[in-house]
Each structure stands twice: as structure tokens, then as C-alpha cells.
Image: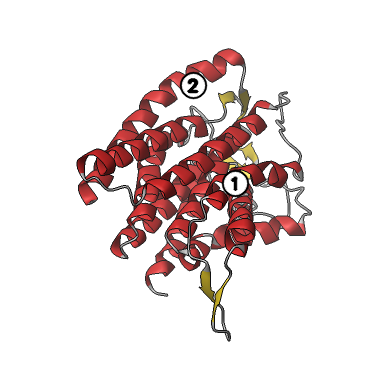
Amino acid sequence: MLIEIFLSGVLGFITTYLCIKWLIRYLRRIGMTVPDMNKEDKPLIPVSGGLAVMAGIFMGLMFFIFVQTFIYNNNSMSLGLFGAITTILLITFIGFVDDSIIHRNSSSSSGLKQWQKPLLTIPAAIPLAVINVGFTKIKLPFFEVIDLGIIYPLIFIPIGIVVAANMVNILAGFNGMEAGMGLIYTLSLGLYAYTHGSYIAAVIALVTFMALLAFFIFNKVPAKILPGDSLTYLLGAIIASIAILGNMEKVALFISIPFIIEFFLKFRAKFNANSYGYYKNGKIQSFYSKIYSLPHIFSRTGKYTEKQITYFMIIIEVIFASLIWFF
């Protein structure tokens, strides 16, 4: 199983790497560029890199299904994987639509309104809901095991997909941050799933890790392409799919702690605060005196570069991702 997962990941890496080179040129040609707000001259950078990552994940998972079907005559994971793939494809497309509705000028870019985003991500939950995957029995503190039955696929799965997609989307704005944090939690989830025998969750997580690794090469400071909502929505759907298919809700919760903290920080600002700052003497300075986003912990001091802030955020994710091995 490990060899098949590894080869699927390699194919995902190669596919993403090749697609990004073409995608950068294509997005520039059609004018899908936005200002890189943390740079002094705010250069226009192609946006919606999630399309290339999705291509890598798609090819990697299809290769895995092919091997399982035609070499091992094993279809036990196919239904769940096809459900996850369809959900990820749909949510990436929704993110691409958001990325394409942009108003560009020298200082800003905008897509869908904040209230529209959760509504538009609901259809992406349908594939996983209708195939009725996951474990309907849950154990709550102070209660016996509860079997949610049909409530689980019809209510809990859509809520999980929508919440996870928009959760990842609120913590963004620095070159390499979304992809870098994604590398940590997909690798952590993949290794945890594999060591606990949940191979369907492991292959989704580790193929995503490899595709993200290829994307990170082009997205790290200074970025040649930005992730856009197509990637943040995709990563949220990946987390939710892994949690649902691998019965790993508690583990997914631990790796999501930075995003939960971000939600409450943004809530303080009524969701009107941006995570990014502005360039000043080679460093990034926050627009705000208070902390309305996790990166503001560093940017409000005006002492750190964009690269440093990105790696600080990745380290924060490493800390919380490591907790899954102790609880």
C-alpha cells in the first residue's frame, strides 16, 4: 500500500509542477492577476493556483484507483475516493469563480461577498453526502455513543465541508503561508491515517501533500503565482474529506486550531480586517494597532519580513499538528 501511495504522490507532484508553469502564463494572458499587497511596488501576480494543485490531486488519486482496481482487484475504497474527488473538484471550481470575479486596481482586489461564500460551497458537499460515507456513530462527553443515522450525511457532512472550506479561506495573505501550513497538516494527517490503518484518508492527504509541495516551489516568497480561493477552498475540503472518510474528526480539529483562533480574531474586527500588511523598509507593518489576525502578532511590530512571518505561521501549525500524536 505504501508504494502505491508514494507513486500516486509522485504523479501528483509532477502533474502540478507541469501545470503551474502553463497556468502562470495562461492566467497572465487572460488578466487574472491581483496585486501582491506585501510588496513595495505591489506587482500583479497570477491568482488561482488551486487549479494546478487540483489537477495533481486528481491524477494522483485516479492512478491509485487504477492500481487498486486493475492490479489488486480491490474496489473497497473507490466509492469514497470518487466522492471526495467530486467534492474537491466542485469546491475548486467554486473557488475559481470567486477568484475570477475580481476588481483590480493599484491597491485592492475583491471577489464574492463574505456572506455568499458559505452558501456557494454547500453544493460541493453533495457528493460525499449522497454516498453516505463516514461513521455515523459518535461519542460525546458525558454521553453514550450516539448513532446519528441519516442526520450525519444530510446535516453534519455539509456543515463540515462548508465550515472547513471557509475556515482555511480566512487565514491567507502571505506568500507561501497557505501552502506551507497546508504541507504541515496534510503530511501530519496522512502519516496519522496511515499508521492507524485508514488508507483512504492517508492517500488523499499524502497525494495532496505532494501536489502542494510542487505548488510551494512557485508560491514561496517571492511568489510567481498566488493560491486564491481555489486553493483555500480545496484545502478545506481536503481536511473535511479526510476527517469524514477516516473517522478522524478529533485529529482534524487539532490541526484546525490556528484557523479557529483566526476566526475569533477576525470576529473581533467584524470580519473587516485583512491578514496582510504593507511594506515598510523591507519589513511588513500591520494596518492595525490591535491583533485581528494571527500574522498581526508579528506584523504589528514592524520587525519582520514577509518570509519570516510566513515561516512563523508554519511553525505555529507544526506545534498544533504535533498534538495529534499525544491525544
29 on left or right of 267: left
Q: Which residue is the site of mark 2?
A: 24
Quarter of image, res 293: bottom right
Q: CA distance from mark 1 to mark 2?
A: 31 Å
| Residue 221 placement (x, y as % from top left) | 47, 36
Q: Is residue 145 visible?
A: yes
User: In the image, what residue type sits under mark 1?
Assistant: Ile
* Image coords of residue 223 (percent x, y): 49, 31
Q: Residue at x 59, y 62 (%)?
A: 150
Tag 2: amino acid:
Ile
Residue at disc 1, secondary structure: helix
Taking the view exactly as shown, the residue that stands out farthest to the top is 29
Work out whether 116 lies above or below 24. Answer: below
Task: Decide which of 297, 283 is in the foreground and name it.
Answer: 297
Tag 1 and tag 2, C-beta contact below 8 Å: no
Q: Crowdedness of circle 1 by 10 Å Cα count: few (<14), some, many (20+)?
A: many
Q: Is residue 276 visible?
A: no
Quick one: quadrant of the C terminus? Answer: bottom left
What scheme was used to colour the molecule? secondary structure
Which residue carries the number 1 mark? Answer: 126
x, y percentage for residue 33? 61, 23
The crowding category of the residue bearing disc 2, from other C-alpha atoms within 10 Å (few below 14, some 14 to 19, many at least 20), is many
First along the sequence among labels 1 and 2:
2
Name the residue at 73% across, 48% down.
Answer: 273
